[in-house]
Amino acid sequence: MPMKLPLFPLTVFGAILMASGALHAAKQAPGPERPPAPTLLAQCAAPFRDNAVLQQKIKLPVWGTSLPQAKVTVVFDTQTKTTAADKDGNWRVVLDPMDAVKLKSVNDSPVGKVMKIVCEKDGSKAVKKLNNLVMGDVWLCAGQSNMAGRMKRAGHPKNYPPNSVNNANYPALRHLTPNKESWQVCSPETSVWISRVSFFFARRVQRDALVPMGLMVTAVGGSNIESWLNQPPYPTGGNYTKLLSPWVGYSIRGAIWYQGESNEKDGRGYQPKLESLITGWRKVWSQGDFPVHFVQLPGIGKSTTENPAGGDGRAEIRQAYFETLALKNTGMAVTIDVGAVSEHPPNKYDVGVRLARSVLQKVYGFKDLTCCPLYTKHVIKKNAVYISFDNTKSGLMIAKKKGFTPPKPTSGAKLQWLSIQAKDGSWHWADGKIDGSQLVVTGKNVSNPIAVRYAYTQHPVGCLLYNKDGQPVGPFSTIGYGPKPIEKKP
């Protein structure tokens, strides 16, 4: 039986997009208004508007309302699909998969097509047209204020890559904006309304994959993850019901998620919630295990402990993100080096690009492109612990990052925030030596080490570990955590 898809008017949905609210908006969005009474002229579900990007290569549901029992015909490209509205006026057709035209560059302007929806009843006919539609990849962008923050509110535009907004003529990049009746084609005028993270994410993906991109941004400042959940054992959240459910069923390529500030005290308890969010969304979308890539929280303020055991502040919730990578088709952007004293770090450029690198490698097949290295296993040999990572084909380096510039190697510098645990359970600051793609960890007067932690603290700053492509190594603890097996040898 086909899935019944909800319908909310775009004017309501646009009003409750986080992009239309302040960064400190309420934790729960206002409820939807009552849908209008059906008319013969087709009313399409919220995402179907002028300038929309339609997901390529998979079946494409199109749905809406008309008069009860009206004959509804959808014409798009070479396809014609006909159905009848039910007794409540709801109708739905499914278009066959279509391919996107490969772009020549990010400035390429794809030729838009018209979708016609013809409704007929009792000798009357009404035709609705959706203009300038393109096939491409649609990404859902969700979370709280750090996902929602617009280019307009960059705060430090001079620090962004030159002319990010002023030269933002990307006709094949479309996004939803506040109080608009259509998707917006990215231009210097419209780009100021787009989420910074999603903008830099999409621009980098589009540069390499050369595919039209559609961004559906739904984010609420201050919202916790519970408000976005939709399956037991958790109750259905208000933001899921009011914001996300009107989009359920609109074909997408995947989702990116930047949230956790309102749940940082959950620590590792955040993991089952994030897993529930991912599996719950996948279930209702009925698109299998579509990709979900997320941002591991950056630092804030300063670390509250000089204890080498770490574990303060955001250390444990970062571990929760890492453990969630056990789920199929997931990825993570590490951001420990782009934190700030405030809750809203200004550098969203690196966040977006790191998400893009993760997606390009794992979703689009750019296997030679490295993303943030993550701990995979360790081996203990006498007094040393050998740590292995993925994404280290280029090798490792100790470097320091400042602002929006790439990390700068620090020859001879000591790797900071590295600790080792002795057999008696005590923790000690450690020394780290790079050996090709491995990190060899030893501790003064620690002859029988049993564990290692790196950057396992609120806000690790200073000389950190990167691969030679400038991607930061994720924080880790080898004490039985993580989605991959730990190896231990005498």
Image (spheres, grey):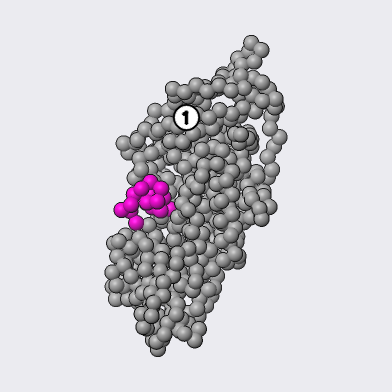
Q: Nearer the viewer, residue 173 or 65?
A: 65
View extreme (top): residue: 123
Q: Secondary structure at mark 1?
A: loop
**Residue at 37% in and 83% down:** 383
Does residue 84 appear left or right of residue 76 in this picture? right
Please tell me whether residue 348 is drawn above or below residue 63 in the rendered image: below
Q: Quadrant of the N terminus?
A: top right
At which x and y percent is residue 121?
64, 15
Please tell me whether residue 376 is drawn above or below residue 251 in the rendered image: below
Answer few, some or many: residues within 10 Å of disc 1's Cα (few below 14, many 20 plus, some between 14 and 19): some
**Residue at 38% in and 31% down:** 110
Q: Nearer the viewer, residue 468 or 289?
A: 289
At which x and y percent is residue 136?
43, 36
Does residue 410 appear left or right of residue 9 in this picture? left
Please tell me whether residue 30 is drawn above or below residue 401 in the rendered image: above
Q: Which residues are magenta?
A: 355-370
**Residue at 36% in and 48% down:** 365
**Residue at 29% in and 76% down:** 412
Q: Can residue 10 be seen here?
A: no
At which x and y percent is residue 38?
68, 25
Q: Is residue 215 magenta?
A: no
Residue beneath label 1, please?
96
The amino acid at mark 1 is: Asp
At which x and y percent is residue 214?
46, 39
Q: Can residue 359 be seen here?
A: yes
Please tell me whether residue 99 is drawn above or below residue 41 in the rendered image: below
Q: Nearer the viewer, residue 405 or 212?
A: 212
